Image (cartoon, rainbow, N blue to C red):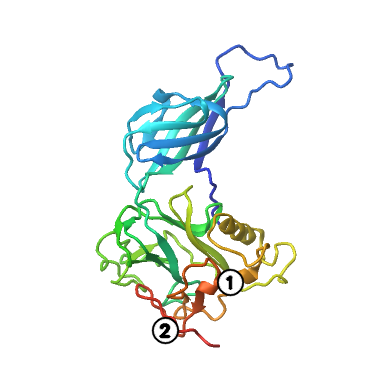
Amino acid sequence: MKTAYSIPVLVCLGALAGCGPVADPRARDVDLRPPLLQAVETAGPGEISVEFDEDASLEESRIRISPALAVTGVTGPGKQVVIKEEAQTPGQRYTLEAEARDIRGNSASFMAEFYGWNGRVPRLLINEFTPRGSGNHPDLIEVKVLSAGDMGGVVLFQGTPGSFDARLVFPAFPVTAGSYILVHCRPSGAPGEVDETGDMTVSQGLDATDTARDFWVPAGKGMGGNNGVLSLYERPGGKCIDGVLYSNRTSQSDEEYKGFGSEEMLARAEELVRDGGWKPAGARLTPEDAVCPEGSTGTRSICRGSASGDTDTSSDWHIVPVRKATFGADNNDETWVP
């Protein structure tokens, strides 16, 4: 299991005391702690917002961005410092290296990642998925595009930003309303498993289709068959676009984790609700609020109803009959009957 944090910090390089007078170690309440990085994210096409737990400043001459972006100015000191630089490439992964210093001279170097600003994020829906795939039909997720835009930096989590098993950050490419993107969650590593940013016919892996763009989760191991969360966000650290919670458990399955079976699964479900990707029926989130995957297979997909209206509840979803999955095409409203 990989764990992500809302703060995209890769590594702290070290903390240094300031160059001012040395504090008397016998004195009480002496501040020797450097500023703590809280978040780094894009605030515009040429701005990076850096947040700390206290007022801090960044030395412009010590800021390094890779791939290179020329820095033109820095605000601060403050809890939020804005680095102004040349325009970013939408969806491009960048690393920021800098040194933060508080008003007492305590400093810390850090390295963090961010993704280039995308001002044309389309409206998207998780539209169909198979968490119980087979050898010939591995786990698969369909994303439907509702409005034209650019996918640069949009991220699909098998989980949520705070805890996930896998994620796919899309590169920049234009999309049109009514088109589809298929995300293959358990690739075999075959040469034909090609990510399609342009031509939709080049990918030749299992269940690849010429009617949608195919993408393959790097080293993906598939989804959980019984419990899981899928979520789409504008970018790492950005707002939730859509999500779905699925589970075959009940409130009586266990007492410690509200029936969800594990602390990890409960945390993911609650994070999706907090971020606006799912709505419980009552005041308390329960496994019964989730879509039940029982009966789904590699060819009986869990499918959004064509007239569901996206209520962010299980009422939007149904399981289609055998061999009625419609990845890369309009959804099938037929319902599987046990």
Picture residue at 54% right of the left edge, 63% below the top:
229
Side of 198 relative to 66 (left or right):
left
The quarter holding residue 291 reads bottom right
Q: Nearer the viewer, residue 241 or 203?
A: 241
Name above or below for residue 305 compared with residue 236.
below
Q: Nearer the viewer, residue 306 or 27?
A: 306
Residue located beneath label 1 in the image: 226
Q: Gap in Å between the C-alphas at discs 1 and 2? A: 21 Å
Q: Nearer the viewer, residue 114 or 174?
A: 174
Counting residues from the start of the chain, the first of labels 1 and 2 encountered is 1
Q: Nearer the viewer, residue 266 or 207?
A: 266
Residue 109, position in %: x, y? 50, 29
Side of 121 relative to 281 (left or right):
left
Residue 284, position in %: x, y? 68, 63
Picture residue at 50% right of the left edge, 43% below the top:
8
User: Where the C terminus falls, by quadrant?
Assistant: bottom right
Residue located beneath label 2 in the image: 323
Does dot 1 land on a helix, a strand or a loop?
loop
Look at the image and tell me whether residue 140 can be seen. Answer: no
Picture residue at 35% right of the left edge, 33% below the top:
85
Q: Amino acid at mark 2?
A: Arg
Binning the other alpha carbons within 10 Å of mark 2 as few (below 14), some (14 to 19) or many (20 upward) gives: few
Name above or below for residue 30 compared with residue 71.
above
User: Where the N terminus falls, by quadrant?
Assistant: bottom right
Picture residue at 52% right of the left edge, 53% below the top:
161
Name above or below for residue 224 compared with residue 275.
below
Look at the image and tell me whether residue 295 can be seen. Answer: yes
Residue 252, position in %: x, y? 73, 71
Binning the other alpha carbons within 10 Å of mark 1 as few (below 14), some (14 to 19) or many (20 upward) gives: some
Q: Amino acid at mark 1?
A: Asn
